Amino acid sequence: MAEIPRAYIDRFTQAINQLSDESRAMLAEELAGIDMSQDVATIRDQAIEIMQKWCGGATDMVALLAAEFYSGLREIEIGEASTPLALSGRVPEATSESVRAFAQHVVDGDTQGFVDLCLERLDYEMRVSAANTVIENGRRDRRKPKYARVPTGAETCDFCLMLASRGYVYSSEVGASHTHNGCDCRVVPSWGGSKVEGYDPKAIKERWQDAIDTKAKERAERNGTTVAEERQQIMDRYKRAASNARARRKER
């Protein structure tokens, strides 16, 4: 099995980030055209219409990038390209429901907060589209790959570090597909034995454990508790987050 060049994955991340930046900038311009002196229901409905247009188009574009990424990765690893499908998995009603929730900021007089959340939602849906397309192509692949989460950004959150530290153990989408705004982790399939250049799950696990220990010590000093107690609370939160992610995935 061939080693997967880190540059190949980094280029995919850079393409997603660039497309997200450009899409959010254009979305911001269109949202700025809404007359925020109107009643909340009118503002909300206009924003939903705009968001449906931008989220639909942007997630489709990311899905195309992800499909090409999947096929190219398959060829690198096993010498066989595929005919990939662009499968964003986007749920339009989820976009609408999110905007309805964001509209509380308009009620509170925080129109900029409302706009900011809409922009974050677009970024989030684009990153979900990238992960979903890779995973759905893997689901249809007769070779049935497993997945790893490979960090590619300068900074990685603790939860993502925990997931990435496990290596190629994910045989389903539940563990591999977690994402958040600005997440630069990539879902990378493997058809058996290939390694990603520079991806070291053991080193990532050490980083994650160090981060948890530091956070637990800080919380223990602040709350007058023990490090062990705080560490257990942190781990319990991670377990709940993972459980919630599985539940959300089943609802989609």
Image (cartoon, rainbow, N blue to C red):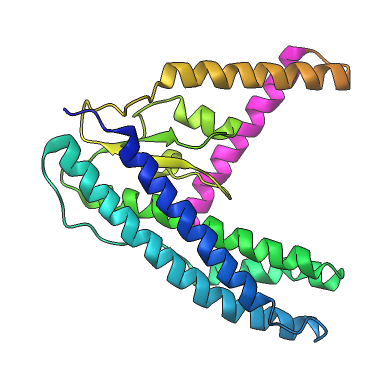
- Which image quadrant is residue 68 in? bottom left
Residue 96's place in the image compared with 226, above or below, is below
Residue 113's place in the image compared with 52, above or below, is above
Residue 237 or 159: which is nearer the viewer?
159
- Name the residue located 75 percent from the left edge and 13 percent from the top edge: 227
Magenta: predominant secondary structure element? helix
Q: Is residue 76 left or right of residue 146?
A: left
Name the spot of residue 40 as percent of width and height, x first: 78, 81
Name the spot of residue 79 as percent of width and height, x first: 11, 39
On the rendered image, what quadrant is the N terminus found in? top left
Furthest residue toward left:
79
In the image, the segment drawn in magenta is 227-252
Inspect the magenta stretch and tell me whether residue 176 lies in it.
no
Residue 93, can we see it? yes
Residue 127, can we see it? no
Residue 217's place in the image compared with 196, above or below, is above
So how many labels did they put on this image? 0
Residue 57 or 103: which is nearer the viewer?
57
Residue 165 or 226: which is nearer the viewer?
165
Q: Is residue 204 left or right of residue 82?
A: right
Name the spot of residue 201 as percent of width and height, x first: 42, 21
- Name the residue located 83 percent from the left edge and 67 percent from the top edge: 110
- Name the residue located 26 percent from the left edge and 32 percent from the top edge: 4
Inspect the magenta stretch and tell me whether residue 249 lies in it.
yes
- Which image quadrant is residue 36 in? bottom right
Name the spot of residue 241 as percent of width and height, x first: 60, 39
- Which image quadrant is residue 76 in? top left
Residue 174's place in the image compared with 30, above or below, is above
- Name the residue located 80 percent from the left edge and 67 percent from the top edge: 105
Q: Is residue 240 left or right of residue 176?
A: right
Residue 19 or 221: which is nearer the viewer?
19
